Amino acid sequence: MTDQVDNWHKLARYDTNMQGELHANLLRNNGITVSLQPLSAIPGMNSGVVLWVENTDLAQAQRILDGVESDDNTGADLLASMSDIELGIVSGSPVNQSSADNQFNKGGNA
């Protein structure tokens, strides 16, 4: 990331924080540096978010978002369409490990 403000371009605005965060994670998982600007300074306020990317990543980011966006896409639709890898879910995640630990403990081998 660079310190120059002029290198950043407004990429997209989303009405809900969830939509913006999902799209930002998709871009980050594709190697693009993203900055999120909440539209409300009040924590917990779901007023939307603006995504900013560096000019060097702008064209690639637009291509990625064009592949998932349409007028009828909601955050839930995007979440459903993203793979586990795009969402950052891996097979060795703590959730899966604790499930395996619980199975082990149920067998009386605690």
Image: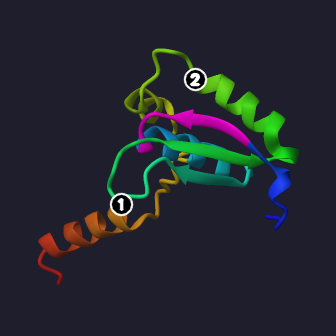
Q: Up-down: is 79 above or below 67?
A: below
> Is residue 95 among the parts visible in the rendering?
yes
Is label 2 in contact with label 1 (beta carbons under 8 Å)?
no
Q: Report x, y in % for residue 47.
A: 39, 42
Left or right relative to 79: residue 26: right
Q: Quadrant of residue 61?
A: top right
What kind of colouring is applied to the model shown? rainbow
Q: Report x, y in % for residue 31.
A: 74, 52
Q: Which residues are magenta?
A: 10-17
SS of the residue under disc 1: loop
Q: Nearer the viewer, residue 84 or 74?
A: 74
**Amino acid residing under circle 2:** Glu
**Residue at numbered disc 1:** 43
Q: Nearer the viewer, mark 2 or mark 1?
A: 1
Q: Quadrant of residue 3?
A: bottom right
> Is residue 84 among the parts visible in the rendering?
no
Q: Residue furthest right?
A: 56
Identity of the residue drawn at 13% across and 70% down? 106
Q: Nearer the viewer, residue 107 or 41?
A: 41
Q: Residue furthest front?
A: 41
**Residue at numbered disc 2:** 69
Quick check: is 82 in the magenta stretch? no
